[in-house]
Image (cartoon, rainbow, N blue to C red):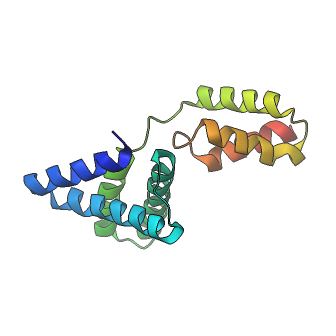
């Protein structure tokens, strides 16, 4: 079962059980997926679908930061609820040790020696850790490893 099919099945079950918040969030995800499919005239596979969900997770995290700064506890709670629903569709996150192992393997595979090779290493890690690691954190670690 693809991620998109799972979303559609979960939408139906949320409708039946009357979970309004869950239903609204799943509809947002499906709308974002459909929008990207229409814009690019393609059918999204699981990797592309997960990237749409990751983008939505990142947006929610940024919104939470902004709402906390603005003192809007009601909106923080709403965004946290949406975030929890969205993260349920992402694969299990990698541990710090697993991320470090991927970085080591990528450095070895690309023969990276300096900070100039950072792009190659990050791209290599991104393909291996798709949806399972925060690429901003990975990028910072790669930069630290190559410059040190």
In the rendered image, residue 11, in percent from the top left (x then y), is placed at 22, 54
- Residue at 29 percent of width and 56 percent of height: 81
- Residue at 23 percent of width and 56 percent of height: 22
Position above or below: 146 against 81: above
Q: Which of the 4 image quadrants contains residue 148?
A: top right
Seen as rendered, the residue at the extreme bottom is 70
In this rendering, would 68 be left or right of 51? Answer: left
Front residue of 101 and 96 = 101
- Residue at 47 percent of width and 54 percent of height: 44
Position above or below: 134 against 21: above
Q: Looking at the image, how many numbered discs can be counted on the residues?
A: 0
Position above or below: 30 against 121: below
In the rendered image, residue 74, in percent from the top left (x then y), is placed at 28, 68
User: Which part of the image, by quadrant, shows the N terminus?
Assistant: top left
Front residue of 34 and 73 = 34
- Residue at 42 percent of width and 43 percent of height: 90
In this rendering, would 21 be left or right of 18? Answer: right
Asked whether residue 84 appears in the rendered view, the answer is no
Q: Which of the 4 image quadrants contains residue 129?
A: top right
């Amino acid at each position: 079962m693809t991620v998109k099919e799972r979303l559609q099945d979960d939408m139906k079950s949320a409708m039946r059980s009357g979970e309004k918040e869950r239903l609204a969030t799943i509809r947002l995800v499906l709308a974002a997926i459909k929008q990207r499919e229409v814009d690019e005239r393609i059918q999204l596979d699981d990797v592309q679908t997960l990237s749409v969900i990751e983008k939505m997770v990142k947006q929610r995290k940024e919104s939470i930061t902004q709402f906390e700064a603005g003192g809007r506890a009601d909106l923080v709670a709403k965004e946290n609820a949406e975030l929890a629903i969205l993260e349920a569709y992402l694969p299990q996150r990698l541990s710090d040790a697993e991320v470090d192992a991927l970085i080591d393997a990528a450095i070895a595979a690309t023969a990276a020696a300096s900070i100039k090779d950072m792009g190659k290493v990050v791209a290599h890690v991104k393909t291996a850790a798709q949806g399972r690691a925060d690429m901003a954190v990975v990028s910072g670690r790669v930069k630290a490893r190559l410059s040190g």
